[in-house]
Image (spheres, coloured by chain):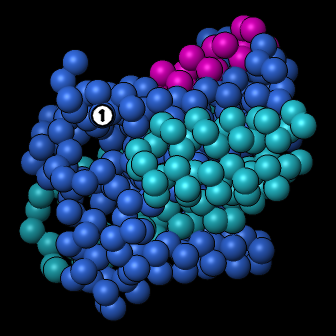
Chain colours: A cyan, B blue
Amino acid sequence: MDNLIFLIAGMAAVTYGPRLAPFLFLGDRKIPGRVDAFLKCIPAAAIGALIIPGVFNAIPEAPVAVLCGMAFTIIAGLWKGGVIVPVIGSVLVVYFILLL
Amino acid sequence: MTEMARKAVKAGIPIFIGYFPAAVAFGILAKGYDVSLLETFLFSAVVFAGASQFIALNLLVSGVGYMGIILTTLLVNFRHFLMSAYLSRRMGALAGKYKFLMAFGVTDEVFSVLSFTPGSLSKTFVFVLQVSAYTGWVSGTLAGYILGGFLPQVLTQSMGIALYSLLLAVLLPELKKSCRILLLTISSGILNTVLVKMAILPDGWTIIVCIVVIALAGAFFIEDELGDSVDG
C-alpha cells in the first residue's frame, strides 16, 4: 500500500476541525436562549441515538446475552449508581452466558 | 490523587474496557491489510475516531481514493461538532488555552460521560477521562498489531457490550430524576432506528439528524426543566 501519511493527515484534519470549531467560536459567548436550550438538549438526544438501535447488534451472534447484560446494567445502575459495577458486571454476564 | 482525578479514573476505566478490544481488532485488521506498524499507530494516535478508522480501511481495500475516504471521514465524524458545541458551552471560560487539547479528545463516550456528570467540570476531570480513553485506543491498536488475537475470543466478544452499558449507566441517574430526558432519549432512539432501517443517509448522519431534530423539539417544548436537570 502506498504512502498513507497523506490520508491519515487528511482524516485527522477533517476529524479535528469539527471537534475544535465550537470551542473557538461558541465558548462562553452570549447566544439566544432558544439556541442555548437546543444545545442543552444535545446530550439526551445524542445518547438515545448512540444506544438504539446499535445495542441490538452489539454482539450479532448473541442478542439475548446482550439484553441480559443491559438488564444487569439497569439494575446495578439504578440500585448503586456509578459506572464501574454496571459496565464490568454486564461484560461478565455476557461472558458467562456465552460460556454456557 | 485528588477527589476529581479519582472520580475521572472511575469513569475512565469503563471507557478503557470498551475501547481496548475494539482497538485490538483495528490493529489486527490493519496488519492484515499490510498497513505498516507506524501508519497503524498514527491512524489511532492522530485521527482517534473509532468507526471512521475501520471504514477507512475498508474503503482503502476496495480501492476508493484518498479524497473519497477523507470526505467519508468528515461525514462520519461530523456528529462530534454537535457534541463539542454542547461541551464548549458547558466548559465555558474554563477550557481556556486547553481547548485545543480538550477538543481533540471529544469522542461519543467521553462526551456522554461529561454531559451527564453533575455539577461543574474541572480540567483535571476532563483530561484524566480523555487520557484513559486515548490510552485504551492507542495501546489496544498497538497490542492488536503486535500480538494479534491474544485475548480469548469469548472475552473480546463479551466486551462488545461495554460501551453500550457505559452509555446507559451514565444516563440512568438522569432518567430517575426526569421523565423528559427519558422521552427525548427514547424518541431519539426510535427515530434513529427508523432512519437506519430506511438506509438513505450516509454512515454517521442518522445520529446527526436525530440530535438536531430531537434537540430542536426539546428546545421548543420542554426547555426549562431539562436545562435545570442537565446543568444540575
- Closer to the camera, B55 or B113? B113
Magenta portion: prevailing SS class: helix
Location of the C terminus of chain A by quadrant is top right
Q: In the image, what residue occupies the spot 16% across and 80% down? A: A33
Q: Is residue B141 magenta?
A: yes
Q: Is residue B223 magenta?
A: no
Location of the N terminus of chain A by quadrant is top right
In this rendering, position of residue A25 left or right of residue B16: left
- Closer to the camera, A75 or B92? A75
Residue furthest top as drawn: B146
In this rendering, position of residue A41 left or right of residue B70: left
- For the question of whether residue A45 can be seen, the reply is yes
Amino acid type at image mark 1: Lys
Q: Which residue is mark 1?
A: B7
Residue numbers of the magenta segment: B134-148
Q: In the image, what residue occupies the spot 24% across and 80% down? A: B225
Residue furthest front as drawn: A79
Quarter location, residue B24: top right
Classify mark 1: helix, strand or loop: helix
- For the question of whether residue B77 can be seen, the reply is no
Which chain does the numbered disc 1 sit on?
B
Does residue B182 lie above or below A8 as drawn?
A: below
- Residue A60 x/y as whole percent: 84, 50
- Closer to the camera, A34 or A26? A34
Q: In the image, what residue occupies the spot 20% across and 29% down? A: B3
Does residue B115 lie above or below B18 as drawn?
A: below
- Residue A36 x/y as whole percent: 22, 73
Q: In the image, what residue occupies the spot 85% across and 38% down? A: A98
Number of numbered markers: 1
- Residue B219 x/y as whole percent: 31, 83
Does residue B12 lie above or below A25 as drawn?
A: above
